[in-house]
Image (cartoon, rainbow, N blue to C red):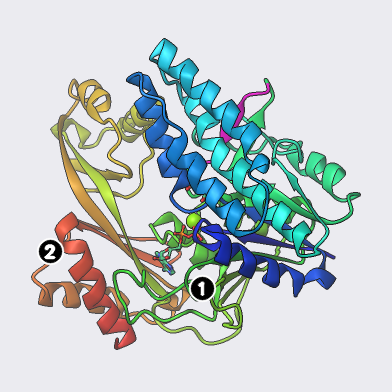
Amino acid sequence: MTIVLKFGGTSVADAAHIREVARIVRARLDRKPAVVVSAHSGVTDQLDRMAREAVTGNVSIAPLAERHFTVLRELGLSTDIAKPLLEQLDALLRGIALVRELSPRTLDHVHSFGERLSCRTVAAHFCAVGVDAFAIDAFDAGLTTDSNYGRARPLPEAEQQIAKTLKPRKGVAVITGYIGRDSEGYVTTLGRNGSDYSGAIFGNALDAEEIQIWTDVDGVMTADPRVVPQARSIPVMTYEEAGELAYYGGKVLHPATIQPAVAKTIPVRVLNTRRPESQGTLIVQSVAEEPAPVTSITSRRGVALMNVQSMRMLDQSGFMARLFDTFGRHEIVIDHIATSEVSVTLSTFGNADLEPVARELSSIAEVTVERNKSAVSIVGRGMRQHGDVVHRALATLHGEKIDPQLITRSALRTSLSLILEESEATPAVRALHREFFKA
Ligand code: ADP
Ligand code: ASP
Ligand code: MG
């Protein structure tokens, strides 16, 4: 029996938060906790800036070092804990400054220092307050990944390696989130916000009875509380809903988090470090209670729309295959799609470089690209029973004078996505929240 607790950046932001983390872990020692930690909040962004600065020849690790020293001092710990890693980071940045080049592989290496530093601080604090603990980098704990720098995925053997390394060890393992190592020995990262995913990977490998994601809000909410202050915590939801919500932009969970949990049907609980007593959100395979029409509303910025128009589509077999093949070869992930007799409209996340795709397709179709769109998604298993969600959503947007450009509903009827202007996303989410949650 074990549980995995993952603490996000704000949960380990400073000495006061780390003390709270120790209290939370201590209260759960009977459940044999393993802990996965993020970097102190803002540190990964800072490392990212430092790496890019280094390309221009500027290296200064002093502010980052000071941030870590301050946390250590406030916890009454020696700054020597951080020094070896800070020296390595300094040498790495000087190397970048020398060659004036930053490859995705090197960027992952730079990014990895945040988690490696914070995990040592957290483990040292646990020991200082009498909780037997040790710090371990995820790659030393068996997390090997492929070599997709910036979005690496665990190799099949990782699960067994992790179990073999960690299960026999005594004390609380404090493991780095976000990072791994490929089979050639290079450090990789699982993508920004990837520590949730690490939590689930370790939960799966250790056969945890529960994976707890500790963050700065009372669980998964009916909308991002920064957008809708009246948003409420959702007591229980399904893996399917959580997966859709994460994918469509609910930052509270990394989109890949749910996979390792689903693989072994491990419950995931999202909890608030600042209010450990609040019940948070339980995410499970199935929920018996009658669902509300909508579980949560989310939005995602930076969406691009591509419209592919061709008279030749008419009656042609293989047109779609050609279209998808082009996207596939250019590694562009298609998100939403709508078709008519003469056109296909596709949306993709993250303002990807669509020019090469557009150029290639221009020989068979007329292609236009529009950027700065948002995808607003309504997620809920209750949409299956409540047939009027689409109608209510569109009527609500109409009332706000918002006319979505692309509308898609999953065949499973658990999500409805609307692509609209970026500037319309916040008013749309607020209006939809009022409609479906009366708040
Ligand atoms: P952590 O550092 O703990 O991983 P994140 O910042 O990645 O935390 O995620 C937590 C944040 O996600 C919250 O502060 C909240 O603003 C945002 N968020 C977005 N959508 C939701 C949602 N549906 N429910 C809860 N939080 C959400
Ligand atoms: N520190 C990493 C990031 O900021 C990973 C995480 O916090 O989940 O993206
Ligand atoms: Mg996060």
Q: Considering only order in the chain, which callout, 2 or 1, is on the residue closer to the N terminus? A: 1
What is the number of the mark on residue 22? none
Q: CA distance from mark 1 to mark 2?
A: 32 Å
Q: Is mark 2 within 8 Å of ligand 1?
A: no
- Residue 237 percent coordinates (x, y): 54, 74
Q: Can the viewer see residue 188 in this picture?
A: yes
Task: Please state if 423 lies on the left or on the right of 81 as rendered.
Answer: left
Q: Is residue 186 magenta?
A: yes
- In magenta, the rendered stretch is 185-191
> Which residue is the site of mark 1?
219
Question: Which dot, 1 or 2, sits closer to the camera?
Answer: 1
Of the pair 262 and 61, the residue shown nearer to us: 61
Q: Is mark 1 within 8 Å of ligand 1?
A: yes
The residue sitting at the left extreme is 401
- Residue 118 percent coordinates (x, y): 60, 48
Q: Is residue 76 magenta?
A: no
Task: Please state if 384 lies on the left or on the right of 327 as rendered.
Answer: right
Q: Quadrant of the N terminus?
A: bottom right
Q: What amino acid type should be assigned to the residue bearing mark 2?
A: Asp
- Residue 192 percent coordinates (x, y): 47, 45
Q: What amino acid type should be assigned to the residue bearing mark 1?
A: Gly
> Which residue is the site of mark 2?
403
Name the residue: 84% across, 72% down. Answer: 30
Q: Can the viewer see residue 176 in this picture?
A: no
Name the residue: 21% across, 22% down. Answer: 359
- Residue 9 percent coordinates (x, y): 51, 56
